[in-house]
Amino acid sequence: MSDGSIIELTNGTAAGCPFHLGENIGGRLPEYLGRHDFDEFYLVTSESLHELFGRKLVSQLTRAGISVNLITVAEGESVKSWPQLTALCERLVAAGATKDSIVGALGGGMISNLAGLAAGLVYRGLRFVEIPTTMLNLTDGALSNKQAINGALGKNQFGVYHAPLFVWADVAMLRREPERQHRSALVEALKNGLVNDVAWFDRMEQLLADGVGAVQDDLLGVCHEMIRSKLRILALDPSERKAGIILEYGHTVGHAVEFLAQGSLLHGEAVGIGMCAAAKVGIRLGVTAPEVLERQEHVLGRLMGAPVAVPEEFSPERIIEVILSDNKRRAGSAVRFVLVPEVGRVHLVDGDYETPVPEPLLKSALAES
Ligand SMILES: NC(=O)c1ccc[n+]([C@@H]2O[C@H](COP(=O)([O-])OP(=O)(O)OC[C@H]3O[C@@H](n4cnc5c(N)ncnc54)[C@H](O)[C@@H]3O)[C@@H](O)[C@H]2O)c1
């Protein structure tokens, strides 16, 4: 279906947060936005995304009588920082934003995280609309309600849960995205299969046997499935603190290598490396069947061409140091991993989906990675 019709979902984590999904649906945004009372729409995006999509969107909105104030921000992971957050909040206020304004975030996860957090802070919370332009943000970030910037010691250390008024998900925008980014997003989707849905993992494995390019042929269908696989998990636990923690599979090491890579690894690539490291940890603990690692390395590495090993320049000691200061660390606890004993299932110890891992064992698994 690529005819401009809209699939109505909810983001599953906040009551009444609609997720409008379709292909070539940009022309209908004014109608949906116009259902809400507001004085001004502050569209936050980057210069390049403004050229690609923003200009057309702004003209569609203004033609419909919607007052739009464009705010462009820089690109790159460094955008998710205190100085950029402060600057954006101040710019929104200086530009005249009121409690009746709506902030729009047009971009990938970086812009969404920054604009979403600014929207959550200005006047203790402005409504905001998420318009994801990357596959990762459309099928993952925009479903989480998590808005955050990075700290000096790790990723996403400062943030809030702030649900969008609605998500406007037009997969047509993803057709302009580099294939490497699709590969990265697909890793996150495969992760959802690995922890919760073996049938979905099998289907993805079949699809990817023809290469990542096969996804383009049914972009809307694949994105819809990716969203469904994540919503299934989020519906169990919107806060991602209990059952939803299984979504963190691969993120313990993944976040650390992503942080250390300073932009040279994409989020999904880092998570893929982290999933392979987690499988090695699980095998050493006698929890994970070796077949899990083999299938992960086959699908991620051979079929998709994604990295599966920790980059040599990051020592096990440095990775562990970053893990220990990561935002997911719980008070008084050791390093903890979500582990997968077999594809589609997560290891549960005493009602906890996270397994404590002794540091020496982690160090040797990382050295092998
Ligand atoms: N909130 C969450 O739950 C959550 C989930 C996953 C990732 N994230 C965060 O998202 C960030 C990564 O975001 P991302 O991978 O979506 O991308 P991104 O925001 O990092 O953007 C990557 C690049 O793609 C470009 N781009 C974006 N859309 C494009 C398009 N349609 N065509 C061509 N180029 C395009 C951007 O300009 C940018 O240069 C990380 O900071 C990560 O921590 C957050």
Image (cartoon, rainbow, N blue to C red):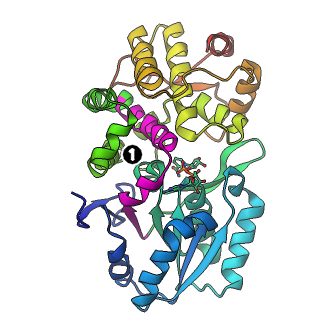
> For the stretch drawn in magenta, what is the main secondary structure?
helix
Residue 35 in the image: state x and y as whole percent. Answer: 34, 83
Residue at 48% in and 51% down: 177
Question: Height in image: 168 above or below 325?
Answer: below
Residue 362 visible, this orientation: yes
Q: Quadrant of the N terminus?
A: bottom left
Question: Height in image: 296 above or below 285?
Answer: below
Residue 335 or residue 270, whichever sits in front: 270
Q: Which residues are magenta?
A: 165-193
Near mark 1 (Cα within 10 A), the count class, few <14, some 14-19 or many ≥20, is some
Question: Height in image: 211 above or below 161?
Answer: above
Magenta stretch holds residue 45: no
Residue 176 in the image: state x and y as whole percent. Answer: 46, 55
**Residue holding disc 1:** 237
Query: How many numbered marks have been drawn onto this rendered protein structure?
Result: 1
Residue 329 visible, this orientation: no
Q: Quadrant of the C terminus?
A: top right
Magenta stretch holds residue 178: yes
Residue at 56% in and 64% down: 49
Task: Say which element carries label 1.
Answer: loop
Residue 324 in the image: state x and y as whole percent. Answer: 70, 31
Question: Height in image: 289 above or below 308?
Answer: above
- State left or right for residue 218 relative to residue 273: left
- State left or right for residue 304 relative to residue 313: left
- State left or right for residue 128 relative to residue 348: right
Q: Quadrant of residue 29?
A: bottom left
Residue 93 or residue 263, whichever sits in front: 263
Residue 318 in the image: state x and y as whole percent. Answer: 76, 25
Q: Quadrant of residue 222?
A: top left
- State left or right for residue 196 relative to residue 60: left
Residue at 68% in and 11% down: 360
Q: Amino acid at mark 1?
A: Asp
